Image (cartoon, rainbow, N blue to C red):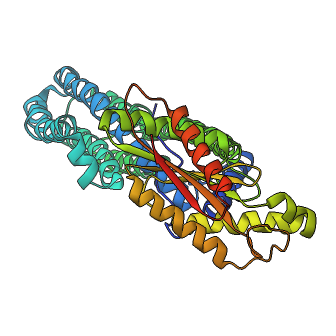
Amino acid sequence: MQEMSIDSKPGPAHLSPGEHEDLDDLRMAQLDGLLQKGFRWMLFPQPIEAQFVHDGMAARLRHFVVSGLISLLVYNGFLLVDYLMANDVFWLAVQLRMGIFTPAALLLLYLSWGHPEWVLKHIPPAVVEGIVLISGLAAACSLAFILASTRSEYMHFYHVGFIVVLTYGNIVQRLRFWNAAIFSISLVAIHTVGVVVLPNFPPRLLWPIVSMVASTALFTLSANYMMERDERRRYLLTLRERGLIQNLTRTHERLTELSRIDGLTGLHNRRHFQEYLDQIWRRAMYDQSSVCVLMVDADHFKKFNDRYGHPAGDECLKAIAQVLKVHVRQPGDLIARYGGEEFIAVLPSTDLVLAVSVAERVRQAVEALQIRHESSNTALVLTVSVGVACVQADFERSVSALTAAADASLYQAKREGRNRVCAQRV
């Protein structure tokens, strides 16, 4: 089975995920169209054709080598036929088969068998196919040369060898259809010309022998067409199946991601935060590093909703989320909506001084938004209280103790009058 991938050629880097999905949908529609309407000319549209050739080349090279070795044994086995049917030029046949054709064939087979990566990297697939085609024509030319040289009374039966060569190219080596067509036409032409120019060739045998070889070419070419048609159809079905699996995987990932995202603010939700914090905690235990948690709460938010309405309250939460995104942005930091008007952030590998600095910038930035909050007992604008907790992770403490400490710091900030940062080291 040839190896393949619908994504073997990545799309342009400047495309957004949505644009990539549009391209995938177009690709799937194209595959469906090919499966329904077929491909009479035995060619796909260029991008799919290039991928088809690329994906199948390694398997075809292995096939060429194995079938080539078998065919070479058969080719040289016909020396017995040369001895029995063209005995007068037997040594000429030995020189052609063993002295010229076989060494060249063995060299190519050795290169393909011993260094397939080099062949696949440096030799275009069309050239590899062309070498196989030429090897078949070379075998046919050697037969024609022996026929032209012999005067044996059995020479007329020797023409059966052309049928064997046709079978070799079209069925055994399975040349691509258009190469097989070139091969078949060329071989029939070589045979016909050879028959016509042979001296003392019985006229009554001309049509039967030529028609026999031509019919074999037609039959083997038809079989070649059907084999490649089935191979291409299987390839399209495999691409389509993999495309469907990728679409399902992408949909699953999107649904999974949506289940971890807060719909209002676009931040991660509490579930995802807890899973991420657990991972950070386990890593910090082995690194013996500190972990800090910031818990942020909008001051007198219920009064804000009661006075200005829930739509205005939603806009406030979005504004706070945006402030957090701006000021909590170190690698590894993660922000989440913890519930209601509460937000939480984890700062891995951060000390208490830096965490308090970040929290203070968040507090000041929210106050600087100047969102009117006339029902607040703290100020006439929207403010937040921030609780900070920091701990060096070890096996004696738990991650729940860290979030509990951040929550305790938050309530301390509220008790002290809100719009402030309180912190503690656990």
Q: How many marks?
A: 0
Residue 330 percent location from the top left of the image = 44, 60
**Residue 342 point in image, percent of width and height:** 70, 52
Task: Work out which quarter of the rendered image holds the C terminus and state it.
Answer: top left
Q: Position of residue 317 (x, y in %)?
A: 74, 63
Q: Is residue 280 left or right of residue 273?
A: left
How far from the left and from the top, in percent, is residue 286? Answer: 32, 33
Q: Using the rendered image of the protein, determine whether residue 215 is visible from the camera's viewpoint.
A: no
Relative to 322, is 127 on the left or the right?
left
Q: Is residue 346 left or right of residue 182?
A: right
Q: Is residue 143 visible?
A: yes
Residue at the farthest front position: 416
Against 97, residue 262 (above or below) is: below
Q: Residue at x 67, y 61 (%)?
A: 418
**Image position of 102 with respect to 154: above or below:** below
Asked where in the image residue 22 lies, by quadrant, the reply is bottom right
Q: Quadrant of residue 169?
A: top left
| Quarter assignment of residue 297 | bottom right
370 displayed left or right of 129: right
Seen from the viewer's position, the closer of residues 83 and 382 is 382
Q: Nearer the viewer, residue 270 or 232?
A: 270
